[in-house]
Amino acid sequence: MELVNLKDAGDTASFAEAVKRGLGKNQGLYFPTRIPTLENIDDLLSRPFAERSIEVLKALIGDELPQGMVEAVVNEAFTFPAPVEKVTDSIYTLELFHGPTLAFKDFGGRFMAQCLSRLSEGQPVTILTATSGDTGAAVAHAFHGIENINVVILFPEGKISPLQEKLFTTLGDNIHTVAVDGDFDACQALVKTAFDDPDVREGLHLNSANSINISRLLAQVCYYFEAVSQVPEEERSNLVISVPSGNFGNLTAGMIAKTMGLPIKRFIAATNLNDTVPRYLKTGEWAPKATVATMSNAMDVSQPNNWPRIEALIEQGYLPADCLRGESVDEEYTHLAMRQLAQLGYTSEPHAAVAYRALSHDLNEGEVGLFLGTAHPAKFRETVENVLGQPLSLPKPLADVAAKTSLAVPLSAEYEDLKAHMLALLKTK
């Protein structure tokens, strides 16, 4: 697999190199120079999840990895289901929250951890990542206890749900957490600055576990195949998928799956009030505004990192521009969508509700819709209970951490403070 830096065409990498580097030069994203088209889609859709995922990933990665590595990684990483549930006669949801941290990022986080632990061959690595909620928990649990890999997770203090925070700030050991006095974009900016600083990048052998890392992105391609495999065959040709979108890695993975031949008619990029992409798709003007805090806080991102990859898919002719529409959903309609879903017998959290609202608003006659459920409702217990007016029980992973004490260290959004903290913490490890 050959990948090219979207900001520097002279900076290329194999899959293994890109996994270990994370970002390319000038903070550029790595992207495949070629995306294969699969001829045996119907056969693949008839196979079990893990078996199919191995074939999809082998087609993307090629034969550069040692014999059996893809199989071993997938079998270690994908140990939980991704069921599709019917919500109405024409709308389904893909539940991606049955992993250890109850969020879709368990798929990418665990796949990346298994890849990197094998590809780093015992050399020290520091994972530096920013989270608006679910990434932190997924990455922390995926890498917890892995030898020679330290993880530093930045999150916006006070801007993610308390239970989300407890999932990754209470582990300790090789997992180090930092509560940043700022929003998620400030956290992302700190990560990017660190990758541009040779003292930190080379001194700590820096890597990133955000969806900018190609391994996480490719892992997510697999559950789109799993989703379509559970939709009745006669409905697949008219399938519209609504993706709750913040940093846009999830949507990018879906569009790669479509490029590979998966029968998806089109996508909806569903955002909250942080609507940079929906506005861009309507006006052609890229004009990020200040990030707005919403109840769907994992999507409180005004400058999505993965957008260049989506543009590459369209500009390079893999997909037509009209296969993607954008919908922004405000807080009132998010509330309404949660209540509507409850009336249909389905309990949802805010992010999935945004995707459901966008889908139900945009679905045409004869189309079949599927929206992604990216997190367990209990991860947003207070919000869900306030909106629906009914108690919500905690699943075991959340109940186990609810009473634990956070180990996070508070820091300003100044890069020099983060640099000093990381060097003091990790230089001797």
Image (cartoon, helix red, strand yellow):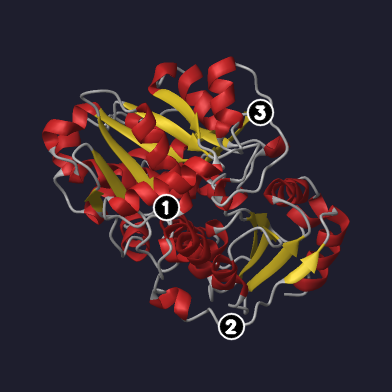
Left or right side of 91 for 156: right
- How crowded pointer 1 is (Cα within 10 Å; few <14, some 14-19, many 20+) is rated as many
Is residue 64 visible in the rendered structure shown here? no
Front-lying residue, 15 or 352 = 352
Q: Which residue type carries mark 2?
A: Lys
Residue at mark 2: 404
| Lateral position of residue 352 relative to residue 231, left or right | right
Secondary structure under the numbered disc 1 in the rendered image: loop
- Residue drawn at x 33%, y 62% is 72
Q: Which of the two discs, 2 and 3, sits closer to the camera?
A: 2
Q: Nearer the viewer, residue 189 or 364?
A: 364
The image position of residue 48, as x and y in percent, is 18, 53
Which residue lies under the disc numbered 1? 374
Task: Indicate the amino acid at tag 1.
Answer: Thr
Distance between mark 1 and mark 2 Cα atoms: 24 Å
Q: Given the image, on which type of amino acid does mark 3 rest?
A: Asp
